[in-house]
Amino acid sequence: MNKLSIKLTLLTFWTILLLASCSKEDSPVPEFEEKNLAPFSVEFDNIVGDRTLSFNNSATPYINAKGEAFTISMLQYYISNIKLATADGKTYAVKQDDSYFLIKSADKATRFAKVNVPEGDYTRLTFTLGVDSLRSTMGIDKRTGVLDPASNGDHDNGGMYWGWNSGYIFFRFEGNSNVISDDVNGDPTGKKQFKYHIGGFGGYSAPTINNIKTITIDLTSAGIAKVRKDRQSNVHLFVDAMKVFNGSNSFKIADHPNVMFSDYSVNIANNLSQMFKHDHTEN
């Protein structure tokens, strides 16, 4: 094949590709019909500041706003109750039984929350960080899969359930920092570990801590979700773990190395709402 033929072949290929791309982009918006479902996903891409998340990287530790160096050994959190909205106000809430996901940073296969929603163009995404109070108080037969305390509740081995407190850990973040003291207010084991286990759904028979957070993402700036049956629409979010320390309620690891079911957990939970940023949408 001569050079001209090669050029013509390449030109034809790119022309076909461009037309196919334009065809998808310019396809009419389907009529909103709740039974007309198509695939949709949200990707939770975990980062730390301007760096990718990696574990136990003692050679190049992360540095928070207070100048404290730290490494990360675990990051896990629940995402639930996914909802979408169109520009003209139509909304769809994913069937609740299909809307619970446990994002494990050590397992990249869990980074996608895959659901089915009606075909349409969506400009707003809403989800819960944590497990809602209604599901938290249901019988064990209604809490299966990632919500099963038996399979995900071994607290000492990375589980996400407090047996002693009968409640889910919404957000579990652990690591090490040399700024942590070895006394009872730090880490008496001498391992200089920090642990942030954030949960609390507001209480069952009496009011308690409520750290459930509703996150709303405007999709108009970085790409709306064009959900169609012939493609996979995916909203790509960056989840910045540095916000645990550097959010609006910034704090020193040395001052609060271990926070679980306590009043201070509310401050950290408020920081968690700031972790999520829409990077782009793939249609």
Image: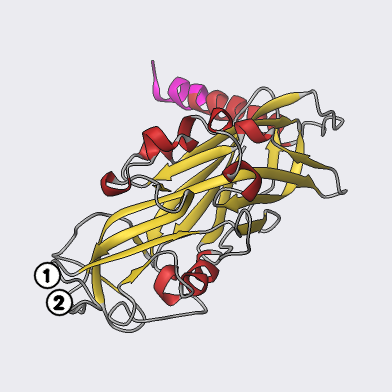
Q: Which residue is mark 1?
A: 190
Q: Position of residue 121 (x, y in %)?
A: 76, 40
Q: Is residue 99 left or right of residue 69?
A: right
Q: Is residue 4 inside the magenta stretch? A: yes
Give the residue type at disc 2.
Asp
Res. 182 mark: 2
Q: Is residue 158 left or right of residue 197?
A: left
- Residue drawn at x 39%, y 55% is 172
Q: Is residue 85 depicted above or below 24 in this figure? A: below
Q: Residue furthest front?
A: 205
Q: Quadrant of residue 241?
A: bottom left
Q: Quadrant of residue 198?
A: bottom left
Which structural element holds mark 1? Answer: loop
Main secondary structure found in the magenta portion:
helix
Magenta-tinted stretch = 1-9
Give the residue type at disc 1.
Gly
Q: Using the rendered image of the protein, determine whether residue 278 is visible from the camera's viewpoint.
A: yes
Q: Is residue 188 depicted above or below 113 in this figure? A: below
